[in-house]
Image: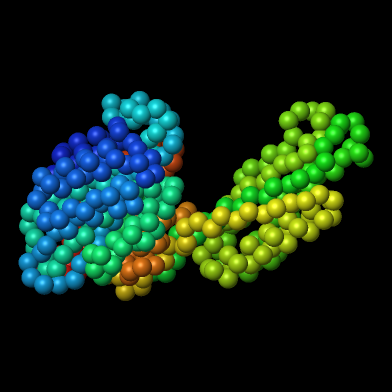
């Protein structure tokens, strides 16, 4: 692959960075050590400005090119997951119950590699804004960075991001214009009945049978209320009622996730969940309350920027290794907030064989770091030539 030669020279150094980050994972907004490590590297590279403390531990660093021009944003997420690592690797997590199981250590490394090259060569006009974001997995750090003015304050014109994908050929790029990842909502239904002895059910108002009926009815939302030409998922993931074999419980709850790409579909599912909750509760003589937590919106790529990013990817990986019309993914991503604020694109980068994302045996493939860094660098030089 025609990765940038100078970036290829950083390969071992990038591996060292990545493995240090992997061994020291941090969660959500509390990426203090990670941010300090990033800032230390950026100072070594000689970037022009470093702005810390955005969304608590987020960073925006600026590199000036040669001549006037716009500012292009490149984003990497930094946070890990609350999981116990089982890899047994020399660079495995040193923090109990925390691990980089999604490759954000690699994403940060790719952006650092691009930063080193761009600060050294400055073969572009305008500016680059390097966006190191906390709390992608939990907390919506991308949204907080937008709310705290990261796009406006630094006059970002366009914004781009990469995510590694195991099980896909090394160095291949995958993206699509329009919706690429789903919105995510969480629903919780709390049921209140009347408990009692399991031998005398006639004296109770049983939340077990009501919960089962609700779950069965929820399964009909996608199969009977939804246009099959639009993609949607409603999954019940928890039912908790009762504590022993001879007691009918007073209460219980149902919990699950909703994934959609279209706001009208999302609204229909919300409406049907409420109707099912209240209707089933009335039918079984108990009370129920639906709580909807509206989380990340759909990640929607801008067509022009996606076509441009795909062309840059072809220059790095070859046309045969770029899929610019991949299927939509039901996962969610808080880069969606940045794409709501600015035009841009989100791409996947193949990482080859290995455990899947969010698996306790996952480890990011260091082989792809120079490829991702080259993509970021070439994106800037092509978008904003000197």
Q: Nearer the viewer, residue 56 or 171?
A: 56
What residue is shown at x 73% (from left), y 30% (from top)?
243
Q: Quadrant of residue 225?
A: bottom right
Residue 252 position (above or below residue 306):
above
Query: Quick check: 211 left or right of 200?
Result: left
Which colour assignment does the render follow? rainbow
Q: Quadrant of residue 203?
A: top right
Q: Position of residue 107 (x, y in %)?
A: 29, 48
Q: Position of residue 162 (x, y in %)?
A: 31, 55
Q: Quadrant of residue 365?
A: top left
Query: Quick check: 57 left or right of 167?
Result: left
Q: Position of residue 278 (x, y in %)?
A: 76, 58
What residue is shown at x 47% (from left), y 62% (from top)?
297
What residue is shown at x 42% (from left), y 69% (from top)?
178
What residue is shown at x 74% (from left), y 51% (from top)?
288
Residue 219 position (above or below residue 87):
below
Q: Quadrant of the C terminus?
A: bottom left
Residue 267 seen in the figure: yes
Residue 170 seen in the figure: no
Residue 198 position (above or below residue 139):
above
| Total residue callouts | 0
Query: Quick check: 241 left or right of 93?
Result: right
């Amino acid at each position: 692959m025609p990765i940038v030669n100078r970036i290829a020279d950083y390969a071992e150094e990038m591996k060292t960075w990545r493995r240090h980050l992997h061994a020291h994972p941090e969660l959500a907004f509390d990426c203090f050590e990670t941010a300090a490590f990033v800032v230390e590297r950026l100072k070594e590279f000689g970037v022009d400005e470093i702005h810390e403390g955005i969304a608590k531990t987020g960073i925006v660093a600026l590199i000036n090119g040669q001549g006037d021009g716009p500012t292009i944003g490149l984003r990497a997420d930094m946070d890990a997951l609350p999981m116990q690592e089982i890899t047994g690797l020399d660079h495995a997590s040193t923090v109990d119950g925390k691990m980089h199981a999604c490759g954000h250590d690699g994403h940060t490394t790719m952006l650092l590699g691009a930063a080193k090259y761009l600060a050294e060569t400055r073969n572009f006009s305008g500016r680059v804004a390097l966006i190191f974001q906390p709390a992608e997995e939990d907390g919506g750090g991308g949204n907080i960075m937008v709310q705290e003015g990261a796009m406006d304050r630094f006059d970002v014109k366009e914004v781009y991001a990469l995510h590694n994908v195991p099980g896909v050929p090394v160095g291949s790029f995958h993206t699509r214009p329009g919706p690429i990842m789903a919105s995510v909502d969480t629903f919780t239904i709390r049921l209140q009945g009347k408990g009692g002895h399991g031998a005398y059910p006639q004296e109770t108002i049983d939340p077990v049978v009501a919960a089962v009926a609700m779950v069965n009815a929820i399964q009909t939302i996608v199969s009977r209320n939804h246009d099959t030409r639009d993609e949607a998922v409603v999954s019940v993931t928890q039912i908790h009622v009762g504590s022993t074999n001879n007691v009918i419980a007073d209460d219980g709850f149902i919990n699950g996730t909703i994934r959609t790409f279209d706001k009208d579909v999302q609204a229909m599912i919300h409406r049907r969940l409420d109707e099912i909750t209240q209707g089933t509760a009335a039918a079984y003589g108990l009370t129920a309350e639906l709580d909807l937590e509206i989380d990340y919106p759909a990640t929607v790529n801008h067509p022009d920027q996606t076509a441009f990013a795909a062309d840059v990817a072809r220059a790095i990986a070859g046309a045969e290794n770029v899929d610019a019309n991949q299927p939509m993914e039901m996962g969610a991503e808080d880069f969606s907030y940045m794409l709501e604020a600015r035009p841009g694109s989100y791409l996947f980068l193949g990482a080859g064989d290995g455990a899947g994302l969010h698996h306790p045996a996952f480890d990011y493939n260091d082989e792809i770091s120079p490829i991702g860094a080259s993509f970021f660098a070439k994106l800037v030089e092509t978008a904003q030539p000197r």
